Amino acid sequence: MSGKKKFTIGIDFGTQAAQAILVDVNNGKLAASSLSKYAHGVITKKLPNSSVELEPGWALQHPKDYLNALKRTVTKLLSDSQIAAEQVIGIGVSFPGSTLIPTTGDGTPLALLEAYKEDPHAWPKHWKHSTADTQADQLTKIALDRFETFLDRYGGSISPEWFFPKAWQIFNESASIYHAADRLIEAADWMVWQLTGIETRNLCAAGFKAFWSKAEGFPLETFFSAMDPSLGDIVEEKMKRKITSLGEQVGELTESAAKWLKLNPGTPVAAGILSSHAAAPAATVSEPGKMALILGHQFTHMVLSSKEYRVPGMCGMVEDGIVPGLIAYQAGQVSSGDHFSWFIEHGVPGSYEKEARKRKISLFSLMEEKAAALQPAESGLVALDWWHGNRSILVDRGLTGLILGYSLATKPEEIYRALLEATTFGTRKIFETFIASGVPINEIIVTGGEPVKNNLLLNILANVTGMEIRVAETSHASALGSAMYAAVAAGESRGGYNSIQEASQKMARLRNKTYIPNNNDKKTYNRLYSEYTLLHDYFGYGHNNAMKRLKNLRDTILIKKK
């Protein structure tokens, strides 16, 4: 690369805010970063400027929040860095998925039209939207009854978070919105459409969230007709466009988009990608044998393989899904960071809050400090990490959490540590399942949000898995990954790269600090893990369905209370 330095912009549209970064293509170093919170966050109670109330489990977002955040963050990057617009050679975006937006044929979200703004189904359904569970269960049954081969790629079960359960929910509950929508589109693809004027579907979201595969395409029309005869043409009518590979240039910034962002028209824009998947190459995971463990509200496990294996309980298996030429596997733990936060909010006494305030540290830091003073197994507790069900490897939303071993001497920090341990036991279960299925994992690299700062969690993870744990240097992995794919979309001729592997080698780095297993702690954790496994199998494989009976009883009471 010669002349002036070249930069790319990566923007990750997260749950509550958009994070944008400007990075040096030569080495991945951060030139500027900007965060913009969404004015409406995640909409769970009532539609904006409306009296329409939402049922529990709904999670919507405002499309204007996305565009406002885009404009604010990108213009701030250039202002703060004083980088000239001509030095920016590409833009990449990522979104959590499935975030589904119903739009008109020109890309206008139905939520922004007067005729539809009072209907919740007109609004973007965030990935946390969970009320399509009935549709997900019915879709799983249809796929099983029809012996659909694609189901094996998704652990044998379909999640309500995915594209088609949400689309079917719109059809079932608001036919007027379904028929008014010329397009049902993932938010990442919609954003690329706004930037380039070109409508495509990115391979990552199509593969992991919408049953598409490189070998078979989408399921046959007869599968969708089994949902409802009117849905047989859902792919052709509502979404079928070119499937765009990761790192491919979809188009260039339009005149209007360039004006919004104070960039040059013609700047290359890469295909969109799912947030967790973008984080993998940013954590140096671009070849087989490594696991990228993305820590956040949920924990997501990304693994690459040169061969295709069936792994029980995975969330998807997609050829070219992260790196062209390799099979990408995704597994997940759906509680994780959320159930740590649950305990801090609901399980810590006022005296601990007072101590944290007095010492001017966060409650999380205080709990980590107290829990770190304990020895493994000192509490006598063992927990199951199923506060929001189990995704991998059991694929069962009906499971709930458990803590065993309470006594009158049990302290809050002991409970907190048991929850940390349970999460790492769940990760080990996933790790072992991959290996037993033929997918090699020789290295675990973590990245993500607040849990990455929890040294105790990472120490426990090393001891439980028996592996050295390495940490990605970046604190903006999804945004950096998006910027790396943008560098590939720009190509070597513009100062970028020819492959995501090359971009990862140049732009991604690991921290020097690592977490090494302690032999004594490993032995103790092996014994605790044996207890975890007994409970995992007893409740997870239906030997005792007490969790589900209690959950059903609770749901019945809640319905009556309404």
Image: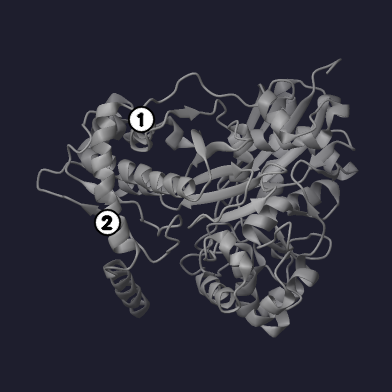
Q: In the rendered image, which quarter is residue 516 located in?
A: top left
The percent position of residue 429, horizontal first and vertical second, equals: 39, 48
For mark 2, what is the residue? Answer: 535
Quarter of the rendering occupied by the N terminus: top right
Question: Residue 59 vs residue 367: left or right?
Answer: right
Question: Residue 265 vs residue 545: left or right?
Answer: right
The percent position of residue 275, horizontal first and vertical second, equals: 61, 45
Of the two numbered discs 2 and 1 in the rendering, the one whose residue sits closer to the viewer: 2
Residue 76 in view here:
no
Q: Secondary structure at mark 1?
A: helix
Question: Which kind of residue does numbered mark 1 sit on?
Answer: Asn
Quarter of the rendering occupied by the C terminus: bottom left
Question: Residue 43 vs residue 540: left or right?
Answer: right
Residue with the most extreme top position: 3
The percent position of residue 553, horizontal first and vertical second, equals: 30, 75
> Which numbered tag is attached to residue 507?
none
Q: Nearer the viewer, residue 399 or 392?
A: 392
Task: Give me the C-alpha separation between circle 2 and circle 1.
Answer: 23 Å
The percent position of residue 401, horizontal first and vertical second, equals: 31, 57
Of mark 2 and mark 1, the one earlier in the sequence is 1
The way the protein has been coloured in the rendering is one colour
For mark 1, what is the residue? Answer: 459
Question: Which kind of residue does numbered mark 2 sit on?
Answer: Leu
Q: Secondary structure at mark 2?
A: helix
Question: Residue 401 vs residue 414: left or right?
Answer: right
Q: Is residue 329 above or below residue 35?
A: below
Q: Neighbour class for label 2 at 10 Å: few (<14), some, many (≥20)?
A: some
Residue 400 in view here:
yes
Residue at 24 percent across and 49 percent down: it is: 531
